[in-house]
Amino acid sequence: MFQKLLIANRGEIAVRIIRACRDLGISPVAVFSSADRQALHVQLADEAYFIGEPPAVQSYLVIETILDAARKSGAEAIHPGYGFLSERAEFARAVEDAGLVFIGPSADSIELMGSKTNAREAALKAGAPIVPGTANKLADTADASDTASKVGYPVMLKASAGGGGKGMRIVRTAAELPSAFETASAEAQAAFGDPSVYIEKYIERPRHIEIQVVADKHGNIIHLGERECSIQRRHQKVIEECPSPLNDPQLRAKMGKAAVNIAKAANYYSVGTLEFLVDAQRDFYFLEMNTRLQVEHPVTELVTGVDLVREQIRIAAGEALTIKQEDVQWQGHAVECRVYAEDPEKNFLPSPGKITKLRTPSGPGVRDDSGVYEGWEVPLFYDPMISKLATYGANREEAINRMQRALREYYVGGIRTTIPFFQDILSDDEFRQGEIDTGFIARYFERRAVQRRQLQNELPDAEDVLSNEEIAAALVAAFDFARQQITPLANGMSTQTSKWKVAGRRATLGNR
């Protein structure tokens, strides 16, 4: 096992890796930009090295600077976390060329599966089903138009070199294709330095389900089941679950087998995730592979009891898996909410600034993977996620109820967060019933818009004469509402009340 490990990342994932290092008796080393000099991951590490100014291209993305920090510290290995350099084959090679160990898969596997078109070809060779479309990059608009007509509209244009919603466009008609192709290509170039895109058949209302795999360098590979990742905003996951509300052991076994076969075809070792779409008939199609640790890994850890970060480090050190496929069990249910420093009332604009007060939830079944603290200044330069809040229960209902309790306890002062947004989503009937797919949030906002329009029509005009009973009811409701706001404020709790909840209270008032 390693004596010292450098973490080439920041925030909550750096903190998570530091904790895994402590469990394994490894000395963790941090790196930081000038904006992160007082960050939590810097404070928790044994050593920390300055690597540049806040823009990632001047610090967290500079390979040679990170390698230099590793040399100075005497670290034997580098963990990339996720984001930044985690899926850059050139970084993995540079680490190995420097005589260090890269905590992740081989550079060849990253290169192969990092290209969405190459990954589709690998999946086909492994006998896994893929979404109908192109296996190769599109040459130009004419090629895209010809392919789309063969596949059949609607189609999805996707960046060949990346993910995360960048370079993606749904095209429903031939007339939309030329402009969509140009926009997707330009966005792909800006995000990944590669303008190439490919086409897939767009599946209406699919579920986005991924399979976690773990493989060592000795040929052993297993899967840890599925995560439901259908609750997405702008193609970015915001709520994840394990297992899926589908809760279908037969489907899990089929998808798990497909995931293992694809990983084997890529000569893969380390932890990795295979992403699939599942349609209304429960047919599944391979999308892509993430050759790194996933943001949503805590829900799998809670349900299977497997520490994925620790396994990732052990595998990199050359150790064999200690668990076989038949040993994996799925017990209970876990839900994760990605808490962002964003304002849901202003179209989720980033909300950087100083955290003036912080109270994190706790109690049975609650886990908060955070990289912030009270007094910390959330910088504008990086992804606005400040924590991953996960809850565990004996079943889905209990896990959701605990998440609602945890969100009520969670208070972040000084900035806006997505906590009120999650409180609303988890109270939604369709979500509670597990009736979810990748279009859920869009439909949710549409339903709320309809409710607000109905509310406006139902409220009495200002000049309407109210009875004494109606006036009394209005005063009681107003007092009730004020008390709900003042009491939590006195207790240091959040008063970030969402407009959807306010609309609901106003509807009650109008009906009185």
Image: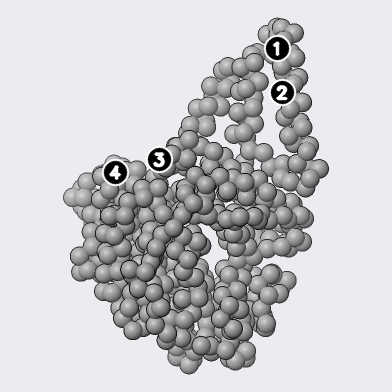
Question: Does the image show residue 385?
Answer: no
**SS assignment at label 3:** loop
Mark 2 to mark 4: distance in Å? 44 Å
Q: Position of residue 67 (x, y in %)?
A: 55, 86
Mark 1 to mark 3: distance in Å? 38 Å
* Mark closer to the chain start, 2 or 4: 4
Q: Residue at image x 31%, y 55%?
A: 249
Residue 505: which quarter of the image?
top right
Q: Amino acid at mark 1?
A: Glu
The residue that disc 2 covers is 477
295 is higher (above) or lower (below) than 426: below
Any mark on residue 435, and which? Answer: 3
Q: Position of residue 511 (x, y in %)?
A: 61, 17
Which residue is situated farthest in the right direction here?
490
Any mark on residue 280, and which? Answer: 4
Q: Residue at image x 46%, y 86%?
A: 317
The reply to whether discs 2 and 4 touch (Cβ–Cβ < 8 Å) is no
The reply to whether discs 4 and 1 touch (Cβ–Cβ < 8 Å) is no
Q: Position of residue 35 (x, y in %)?
A: 69, 69
Q: Position of residue 198 (x, y in %)?
A: 30, 59
Badge 4: how crowded within 10 Å, few (<14), some, or many (20+)?
few
* Mark closer to the chain start, 1 or 3: 3
Mark 3 to mark 4: distance in Å? 11 Å
**SS assignment at label 2:** helix
The residue that disc 1 covers is 470
Mark 4 to mark 1: distance in Å? 48 Å
Q: Residue at image x 27%, y 48%?
A: 282
* Mark closer to the chain start, 1 or 2: 1
Return the residue nearer the eye: 256 or 97: 256
